[in-house]
Image (cartoon, grey):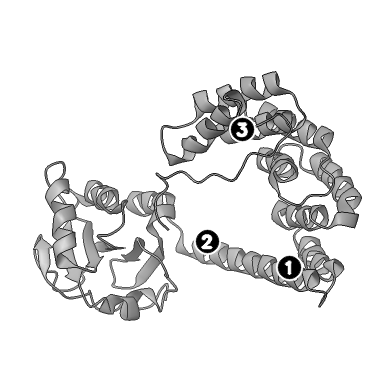
Amino acid sequence: MIGEAAPDIPRGPVLTGEPPTGYVDGVRTILLFWSPLMPSSAEQLRTLALNTRDRKDVEGIAVALGSEGMAKKVLADLQTRVAVPTVVVDEDERSRASFLEPLGLESLPAIVVIDADGTVMFHGPANGSAIVLGQILAGSWNPDRYVDDALEWGARQQVLKEANRLHGLARRGRATIDDAIAVLDEAAALDPRNEVFQVRKFDLLLMTPDRCGDAYELGRALMERFPRSALTLNDLAWHVASYRGVSDRDLDFALEASRRSNALQGWIDPAHLDTLARVHWLRGERADAIRWQREAVAHGPDSWYGDAFRENLRLYTDGSLAPGEMPPAYVSPRRPAR
């Protein structure tokens, strides 16, 4: 729907601001669709308010899907800290059918931006739209480039989905691992600088008991092909050190990849330091594991994201896990609901 006329603004009880009558000519409208039940709701409303207040060229409208009473509770706390934008309640969630479903937006919170001429210029999950919104507000956003990027991303996701489907069939004896790899090889031939396809090929080989040798041969080639890609190097190390069911963990390979990624990041990225500590732990090198895990904690945020680093440090230091043992999977209780 990008470039097409936007549906009418959702109607319903207005909790703050003036009832919207329609899109204002010459003014861009940012619609935030949110659920009063989600912990991040107040922060999303605050962000919308800060981005649109004191601006005559942008209007912010927050559409609450769900209970009017719950929406009022969220606003009651928020209004003591910031002037909230116009809030409309859609208790029947009719805007899902008119706005969200046609745009493929399946979860909340979601953002839809209407251009000054009344056409849709952007839509996406609110939690991943900060950069785009910043560009829109600054007047530097390029919708044509966005569409191209979105199509490319969609094509890449389809390749990965098909490879994963074939991998699942291979595990049930209805296809072979080489069928899945052929899909990734074809995509990589069209886009040889795309590391995602090649790391996924590494993963499939790594998780196939008799193909680990092929995985490490490919992994070493990727380290030389993408020597400046810290993310790729960290992925190679982390997958060796964290994937369950790997029959042959080459921890020398993982250590080299992890040290390279950390050197590129200046030894301050907590996720990459966490990987390095994990590799040392699996190698039985307790002192090195604790030293690097403490660095990961020092650089990690005081949020759900940093909780995993702190939990790993606890496991390494309190005697509940022996060096060489794989730490259990951990999900922070502070992680926002998806």
Q: Is residue 188 above or below residue 166?
A: above
Q: Give the mark, 2 or 3, whose residue is nearer the N terminus.
A: 2
**What whole-number distance in Å separates the C-alpha atoms at marks 3 and 1?**
29 Å
Looking at the image, residue 55 sits to the left or right of residue 190; the answer is left
2 and 3 marks in contact (CB < 8 Å): no
- Judged from the image, the secondary structure of the residue bearing numbered disc 3 is helix
Please rate how many residues cluster around mark 1, counting C-alpha atoms within 10 Å: few if below 14, some from 14 to 19, many from 20. many
**Pair 2/1: label in front:** 1
Displayed quadrant of residue 95: bottom left
Residue 105 in the image, given as x and y percentages of width and height: 42, 70
Residue situated in front as seen by the camera: 190 or 44: 44
In the image, taking residue 142 as reference, residue 117 lies left or right, namely: left
- Residue 211 position, x and y percent, is 89, 55
Residue tagged by mark 1? 163
| Position of residue 28 measured from the top left corner of the image (x, y, whole percent) | 27, 62
Q: Earlier in the sequence, mark 2 or mark 1?
A: 2
Residue in the foreground of this view, choosing between 76 and 8: 76
- Residue 274 marker: 3
Q: Which image quadrant: the C terminus? A: bottom left
What mark, if any, has residue 145 been given in the picture?
Answer: 2
Tell whether 309 sits left or right of 28.
Answer: right
The amino acid type, in three-letter code, at marker 3 is Asp
Q: Amino acid at mark 2?
A: Arg
Residue 87 percent across, percent down from the top left: 17, 62
Q: Sequence-wise, which precedes: disc 3 or disc 1?
A: 1
**In front here: 305 or 24?**
305
